[in-house]
Image (tube, grey):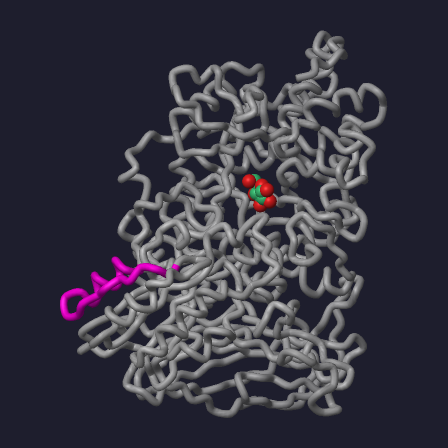
């Protein structure tokens, strides 16, 4: 680490303190205001200490906990006692506490280190991927999963998680679609609130509260061709209409930090894009926490041909509003020189340090820097946490097809044959970013099916179908096993690393061999149930015709095997609905429900269509089947002509014409028929999931607030509410209302 030459600052330090009068507040005194504590501490820091504070490295697993003095990041760089933050790669409380002890006792000012990790969908109790969770339409359960994740993280020594990811994802080729809450900005915004509140609790300083980090600000999901780290061209309208609402929601929910993204945003990489980070994120959205760069993204400005060298990259990034530098050590190594050479004003460094210290004080880190040492059984996998994970897996799975009520399986089923690469697999059910979870905790599909059906039926696994090939013997072996079988269950899908970061795919079709396996099964004459697992929407039009039923199980965390068995047996009535469109084929991408009309949409079929594929997706946003039989009434409006200050109360009754209790999610869409900016054919403005008892009826209500629900945003982020006709749409029901 570079020594700062301006030693005279240290010699005159006492004078500086007295002169600016900050020494009257003891920053270690919790009775003082956070603001005063920050200023008091900042005024005592040397430039070198400040530059360490805006730096985050990785705390590698040190095999020998006794020589923690040698603790370092995997490249061997020292974790100094003055460093601002570390990403802890493991839940080893001894190592984390020792690093913290050095910061508190061996540094001059005793500033605690902020310890982070990517807890994306659970810590040790792993939950389904965020995209799966979005398909549950269960705000409370998503909130609860974040609460569990926060508590287990806190007990692992983690006080900051790089989550939730709020990139509205509409390109299934992009691997990180798995970490999003789907294609709709309102849906991402709704879950953003729940997850931020779940992580941060009532107060950041409460026990089990950890700081959220909403990411990746902004436009990362527009990565060209779906390839990670590619440049993005984002129109102003897309920025404000689609990308921004989830961040506004997260900031309004109090998100403590934001992570800037990797992408080159319209020619200015986000990490150094002051218009985005200072003008929009802070001045327009009102964010007052700190921004951390993504992994070495300051350094990558040189590779992106935006910075001459690392010093310029650092200066541009911190001036643009990126407060903390992740892992490329540029701020620590070069900004002292930049200040000395007059290329960077120290007040900019102060501003970043101030923001970081505020979060540390808000977290109560100065008062409670250490983590209680507990047994894993005391800090992880409580019965309640496991129940939450199972419930979320059950409620996020989506029944895509159920020909002739193939599902649920009859209680008299005597033989079930299971095949496919996911049948006995653990790691690929967990998805990307596994936190501190363990493969050993995963319940496989075979295990789940045997637990549920094994007492009354034979459950037999047939090998031979792997992710990308099917053995020549498979057909023969399956035929033999399927003799007298009631059903063949094929557990198909993606490998864990086929999605996630840097997990782009040029084709979202499943491998041909998997579709072949379905055809082979179907030729044997018994029912074929296909389970598909993936972190992204997959194109399964090839296998779809040969399957009697298709249940999309996503990457379901620890208990996917139990969730699948509970749904196939009818113990659980599937209630998941798609939060992202499933294209008919990759060539349709980008395809999403809230699209604008084709110019010739009134000229009949053939106009603006493909020569070689349909224009409709295989499964629409919101699609999902139930074992119940729901029937919707017409939409009733308490008024159809109204003014901007009125509320319009809309009601729909949903009847359940079956003997099976079922939960239905009602999607209320708005269609602004004519506007001074063309509007999508429909925009989701409310979703609500409720139980509809067997042979009963449940009322769903949407009270329209015109400014909230009928307005639109323009390319400058300005909101407009215009008079005219609006269609309100629920499933196939429509009512027109008129704003005068
Ligand atoms: C990764 C990801 C980001 C993650 C960070 C720290 O490259 O882009 O989402 O939080 O680095 O692991």
In the rendered image, residue 327, in percent from the top left (x then y), is placed at: 62, 31
- Res 393 visible: no
Residue 451 belongs to magenta span: yes
Q: Between 606 and 662, which is closer to the camera in this rendering?
A: 606
Task: Check the image and report above or below for 637 versus 242.
Answer: below
Which contiguous range is marked in magenta?
A: 445-465
Q: Residue at x 31, y 81 (%)?
A: 525
Task: Check the image and report above or below for 388 versus 405.
Answer: above
In the rendered image, residue 420, in percent from the top left (x then y), is placed at: 36, 62
Rendering quarter of residue 391: bottom left
Rendering quarter of residue 526: bottom left
Q: Splitting the image into four quadrants, where does ligand 1 fall?
A: top right
Side of 705 relative to 458 (left or right): right
- Res 429 visible: yes
Q: Between 120 and 404, which is closer to the camera in this rendering?
A: 404
Residue 685 belongs to magenta span: no
Q: Residue at x 56, y 63 (%)?
A: 508
Q: Between 505 and 174, which is closer to the camera in this rendering?
A: 505
Q: The N terminus is located in which quarter?
A: top right
Q: Between 526 and 76, which is closer to the camera in this rendering?
A: 526
In the rendered image, residue 288, in percent from the top left (x then y), is placed at: 66, 44
Side of 603 relative to 295 (left or right): right
Q: The C terminus is located in which quarter?
A: bottom right
Rendering quarter of residue 140: bottom left
Q: Residue at x 30, y 54 (%)?
A: 443
């Amino acid at each position: 680490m570079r020594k700062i030459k301006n030693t005279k600052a240290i010699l005159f330090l006492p004078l500086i303190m007295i002169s600016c009068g900050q020494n009257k507040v003891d920053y270690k005194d919790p009775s003082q205001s956070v603001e005063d504590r920050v200023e008091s501490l900042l005024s005592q820091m040397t430039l070198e200490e400040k530059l360490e504070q805006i730096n985050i490295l990785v705390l590698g697993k040190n095999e020998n906990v006794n020589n923690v003095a040698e603790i370092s990041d995997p490249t061997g760089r020292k974790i100094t006692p003055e460093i601002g933050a570390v990403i802890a790669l493991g839940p080893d409380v001894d190592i984390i506490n020792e690093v913290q002890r050095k910061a508190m006792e061996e540094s001059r000012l005793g500033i605690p280190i902020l310890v982070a990790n990517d807890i994306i969908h659970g810590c040790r109790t792993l939950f389904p991927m965020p995209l799966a969770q979005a398909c549950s339409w269960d705000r409370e359960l998503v909130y609860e999963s974040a609460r569990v994740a926060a508590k287990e993280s806190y007990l692992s020594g983690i006080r900051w998680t790089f989550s939730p990811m709020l990139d509205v994802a509409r390109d299934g080729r992009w691997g990180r679609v798995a970490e999003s809450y789907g294609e709709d900005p309102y849906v991402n915004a709704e879950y953003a609130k729940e997850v931020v509140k779940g992580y941060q609790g009532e107060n950041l300083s409460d026990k089990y509260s950890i700081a959220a980090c909403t990411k990746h600000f902004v436009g990362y999901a527009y990565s060209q061709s779906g390839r990670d780290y590619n440049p993005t061209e984002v129109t102003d309208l897309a920025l404000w209409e689609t990308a921004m609402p989830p961040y506004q929601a997260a900031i309004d929910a109090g998100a403590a930090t934001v992570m800037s993204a990797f992408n080159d945003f319209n020619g200015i990489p986000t990490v150094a894009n002051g218009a985005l980070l200072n003008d929009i994120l802070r001045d327009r959205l009102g964010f007052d926490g700190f921004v951390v760069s993504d992994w070495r993204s300051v350094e990558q400005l040189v590779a992106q041909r935006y910075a001459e060298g690392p010093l310029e990259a650092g200066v541009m990034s911190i001036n643009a509003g990126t407060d903390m530098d992740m892992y490329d050590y540029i701020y620590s190594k070069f900004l002292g020189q930049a200040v000395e050479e007059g290329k960077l004003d120290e007040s900019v460094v102060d501003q970043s340090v101030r923001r970081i210290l505020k979060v540390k004080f808000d977290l109560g880190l100065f008062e409670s820097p250490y983590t209680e040492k507990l047994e894993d059984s005391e800090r992880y996998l409580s019965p309640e946490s496991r129940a939450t994970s199972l419930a979320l897996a059950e409620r996020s799975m989506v029944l895509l097809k159920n020909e002739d009520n193939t599902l649920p399986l009859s209680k008299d089923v005597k033989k079930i044959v299971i095949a496919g690469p996911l049948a006995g697999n653990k790691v690929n059910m967990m998805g990307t970013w596994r936190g501190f979870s363990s493969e050993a905790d995963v319940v496989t599909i075979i295990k789940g099916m045997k637990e549920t059906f094994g007492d009354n039926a034979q459950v037999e696994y047939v090998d031979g179908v792997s992710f990308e090939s099917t053995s020549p013997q498979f057909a023969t072996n399956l035929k033999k096993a399927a003799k007298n079988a009631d059903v063949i269950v094929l557990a198909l899908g993606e490998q864990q690393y086929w999605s996630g970061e840097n997990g782009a795919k040029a084709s979202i079709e499943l491998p041909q061999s998997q579709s072949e396996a379905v055809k082979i099964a179907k030729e044997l004459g018994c029912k074929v149930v296909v389970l598909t697992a993936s972190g992204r929407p997959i194109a399964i039009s090839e296998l779809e015709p040969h399957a009697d039923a298709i249940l999309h199980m996503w990457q379901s965390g620890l208990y996917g095997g139990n969730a699948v068995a509970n749904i196939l047996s009818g113990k659980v009535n599937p209630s998941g609905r798609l939060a992202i469109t499933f294209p008919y084929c990759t060539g349709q991408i980008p395809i999403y429900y809230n699209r604008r009309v084709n110019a010739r949409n009134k000229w009949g079929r053939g106009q603006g269509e493909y020569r070689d594929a349909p224009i409709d997706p295989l499964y629409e946003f919101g699609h999902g089947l139930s074992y119940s039989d729901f029937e919707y009434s017409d939409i009733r409006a308490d008024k159809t002509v109204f003014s901007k200050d009125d509320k319009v109360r809309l009601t729909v009754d949903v009847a359940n014409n079956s003997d099976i209790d079922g939960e239905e999610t009602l999607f209320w869409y708005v269609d602004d028929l004519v506007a001074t900016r063309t509007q999508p054919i429909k925009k989701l403005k409310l979703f609500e999931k409720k139980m509809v008892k067997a042979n009963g009826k449940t009322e769903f209500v949407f009270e329209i607030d015109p400014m909230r629900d009928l307005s639109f945003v323009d390319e400058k982020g300005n909101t407009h509410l215009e008079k005219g006709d609006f269609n309100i749409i629920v499933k196939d029901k429509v009512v027109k209302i008129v704003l005068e």
